Image: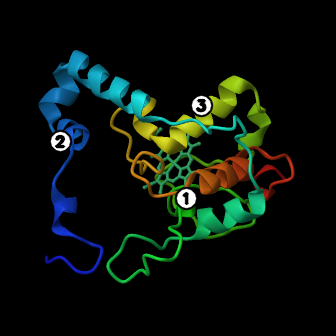
């Protein structure tokens, strides 16, 4: 492997969390160390400054379906995608989706209480808050998606008019 454009070799260095989750002994034994890493993930979450969590689901669906960004041959001036469909079912009319993550179809039936808004935001911002060795990307803390893109994704999941909730 060699560095090319924005895909640099430092990406192969595991951060502390990844190293801990790759170590079977930690996973089995060191609950305190894993809880410290989970707490650090929790501290990384930045909630929307204006207190408004819900953007536009139509834009959110574009972000969810877009698998581009951060690869050597992607244009860094274009917005990154979330590639959510690679792991989740969302809009039930979309036939191409992965199943590594749970289906998010009808996610909006959980409502928009303060608790749900914060849970969903944090889960997308840094999934390790709720599952320390999550396999889902850290869309906020790794700066993959912008705050506006995260709000649009929130709308895709929670807006009653979103195709996810039909
Ligand atoms: C590489 C696979 C992968 C990608 C890409 C991915 N996820 Fe996930 N996601 C998972 C897995 C696995 C879980 C369940 C385990 C966990 O919580 O980490 C999950 C859990 C979730 C949950 C919690 C589900 C619940 O029932 O509470 C939400 C919400 C979620 N993902 C949203 C998203 C959104 C939105 C995107 C795109 C921006 C996305 N995910 C992209 C793998 C992925």
Mark 2 vs ligand 1: CB below 8 Å: no
Disc 1 crowd rating (10 Å Cα; few below 14, some 14-19, many 20+) is many
Q: Which residue is mark 1?
A: 84
Disc number for residue 19: 2
Q: Residue at x 68, y 47 (%)?
A: 154
Q: Nearer the viewer, mark 3 or mark 1?
A: 3
Query: Residue 77 at what x, y percent from top left?
Result: 48, 77
Residue 159 in the figure: left or right of residue 78: right
Work out whether residue 160 or residue 47 is closer to the camera in this orientation and state it.
47
For mark 3, give the secondary structure.
Answer: helix
Disc 2 crowd rating (10 Å Cα; few below 14, some 14-19, many 20+) is few
Mark 1 vs ligand 1: CB below 8 Å: yes
**Residue 41, can we see it?**
yes
Residue 29 in the figure: left or right of residue 57: left
Mark 3 vs ligand 1: CB below 8 Å: yes
Mark 3 to mark 1 CA distance (whole Å): 17 Å
Q: Residue at x 42, y 47 (%)?
A: 138
Q: Residue at x 29, y 28 (%)?
A: 37
Mark 2 to mark 3 CA distance (whole Å): 25 Å
The answer to which quarter of the image holds residue 2 is bottom left
Mark 2 to mark 1 CA distance (whole Å): 24 Å
Q: Which residue is mark 3?
A: 119
Work out whether residue 21 or residue 28 is closer to the camera in this orientation and state it.
21
């Amino acid at each position: 492997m060699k560095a090319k454009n924005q895909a640099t070799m430092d990406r192969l260095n595991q951060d502390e969390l990844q190293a801990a989750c790759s170590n079977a002994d930690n996973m089995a034994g060191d609950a305190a160390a894993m809880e410290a890493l989970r707490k650090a993930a929790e501290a990384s979450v930045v909630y929307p400054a204006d207190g408004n969590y819900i953007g536009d689901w139509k834009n959110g669906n574009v972000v969810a379906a877009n698998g581009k960004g951060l690869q050597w041959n992607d244009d860094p001036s274009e917005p990154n995608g979330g590639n959510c469909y690679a792991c989740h079912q969302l809009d039930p009319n979309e036939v191409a989706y992965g199943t590594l993550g749970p289906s998010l179809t009808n996610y909006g039936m959980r409502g928009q209480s303060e608790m749900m808004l914060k849970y969903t935001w944090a889960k997308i911002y840094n999934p390790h808050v709720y599952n320390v060795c999550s396999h889902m990307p850290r869309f906020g803390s790794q700066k993959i998606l912008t705050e506006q893109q995260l709000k649009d994704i929130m709308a895709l999941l929670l807006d009653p008019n979103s195709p996810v909730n039909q």
